[in-house]
Image (spheres, rainbow, N blue to C red):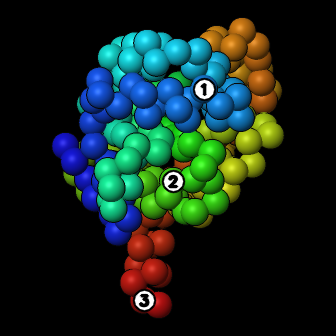
Amino acid sequence: MILQTNRLILRPWKEADAESLYEYAKDPLVGPAAGWPEHKSVEESLNVIKYVFNGPECYAVCRKEDGGVMGAAELKLYGKSELAGREDECELGYWIGRPFWGRGYIPEAARELIRRAFEDLGMRAVWCGYYEGNRKSGRVQEKCGFRYHHTDRNRAVPQLGETRISRASLLTKEDWRKIREEEQGD
């Protein structure tokens, strides 16, 4: 599946993306904020593409103008999500390389995946979370219409061997429809 927005192409990851992935995932300000360690080699990035970014709804976030990979976005389906508790719920996850922060790419990608979740996959709710201190991720959720649901003060972060405070947000299909109607009415 390939999805498009005004500025982006969301497509499955390819092994050839390993160098681009490594370029952004080696940054200590990117992965640890999302709960994973920075990558140490192109080979590690290749393994992540093969064994982590292989879900049916995991996408490389690419610039439409040149196809360059900037980050990742995924709808984690039931069974792969820590937040979704039903088959008609999923969890949205995302990250983007630091050179692209503050340009609205991730909210744009997230909105398309939310649309896909509700219109194409028949979801009734999309969950999303972020760790305390990752205000940028929380801001993306606010821009996309998510509402705060709960705080987990002891969320295990196994890849980093620690626990953190995490905040979970929820967007229901009903709330999403209302937001879309309001946007179309403007």
- Left or right, 124 with respect to 38, comes to left
Q: Earlier in the sequence, mark 3 or mark 2?
A: 2
In which image quadrant can residue 158 be found? top right
Q: Which residue is mark 3?
A: 185
Q: Nearer the viewer, mark 3 or mark 2?
A: 2
Image coordinates for residue 19, horizontal then vertical, percent: 42, 28
Query: Tag 1: residue type?
Result: Lys
Q: Which residue is mark 2?
A: 106
Which residue is at the front of the view, 95 or 149? Answer: 95
- Left or right, 27 with respect to 177, comes to right
**C-alpha distance separating marks 3 and 2:** 24 Å
**C-alpha distance separating marks 2 and 1:** 19 Å
Which residue is at the front of the view, 83 or 100? Answer: 100
The answer to whether any part of residue 174 appears in the image is no
Picture disc at residue 26: 1
Image coordinates for residue 37, horizontal then vertical, percent: 64, 19
Residue at (28% x, 58% y) in the render? 4
Q: Secondary structure at mark 3?
A: helix
